Amino acid sequence: MTRLIFFLAIWLATTFPVNAQAEAYCFEHERFAPDGKVVELGGRDFRICHKQYQVGRNPDVDFFLRVPFNSSHVQRVLKQNKEIEFLWGQLKVRDLDFEYPSDNNYTSSKFHIGDLYFSGARYKAYYSRPLSEDTVIQSFEKGNFGSASPLLVYSPIGQAKMMPHFFKCSGDIKGTPRGKYHCRFNILFDEEKRLIAHTRLIWSPELSVTHPLDFDNLHIFLNALVAVFEGMEVSKAD
């Protein structure tokens, strides 16, 4: 019996090492490695790896949390979404409701100039003036906006599959070969707490090392961005 206990102890030690540790939450090079640091933002707790949240010009309404594109938070989500190559953004607390065009913040984009479809979802496009020339209209329908930068508002038909969002883009977001583009996204992260995720995409064939975003995968991109912040929230992640 003593010998049996001895061999059982050896088997347990080799199968389940005493010093085995769970995978670190943060990458080694990140500031708060390995376990991260919990910070409060908008009445909720988030575990961060890179640095403390930042304060904008108005500290009462402009606290925000930046997420670098090479952070462990982003890389974990990218591994689960092979259709996209890059993702980053920031989480901002604002003392405003999520607003669509025609509200006070977007009076410069009040003309509905048509609808576009990305990843099977409808987007209503707004601009500062109506489209008039046929060539301009054709370019718009092909997703080549030039410097116009229309406001594109997610307007789902039927049951929504993404969080409410809108974005502005200039340049060419659907051409072949693709030209450069510049987009800014606003995504409602949490309706009750009014947390809004922001991200910015800049791509050009001369400077970028990754492929341009396929806007038919836009739903994956936006859902992944929300997943980054959901994964950072302590109440959801722990």
Image: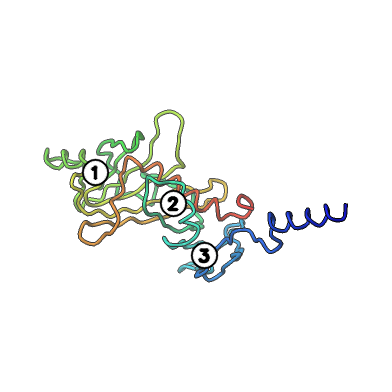
Kindly identify the amino acid type of the residue bearing the numbered disc 2: Leu
Residue 202: give x, y in percent of width and height.
29, 57
Question: Outermost residue toward the top?
Answer: 158
Report the residue marked by disc 2.
78
Label 1 element class: loop
Is 127 left, or right, of 192 in this rendering? left
Identify the residue under disc 3.
27
Q: At x 50% / y 48%, what residue is drawn?
A: 227
Tag of residue 174: 1
Q: CA distance from mark 3 to mark 1?
A: 35 Å
Q: Nearer the viewer, residue 79 or 201?
A: 79
Q: Amino acid at mark 1?
A: Lys
- Mark-to-mark CA distance, 2 and 3: 15 Å
Residue at the image point whose x is 60% and y is 64% from the top: 39
Label whose residue precedes the other's in the sequence (2 or 3):
3
Q: Residues within 10 Å of mark 1 (few under 14, many from 20)?
A: many
User: Up-down: is 5 above or below 119?
Assistant: below
The amino acid on which the numbered mark 3 sits, given as a three-letter code, is Phe
Q: Quadrant for residue 36, please give it.
A: bottom right
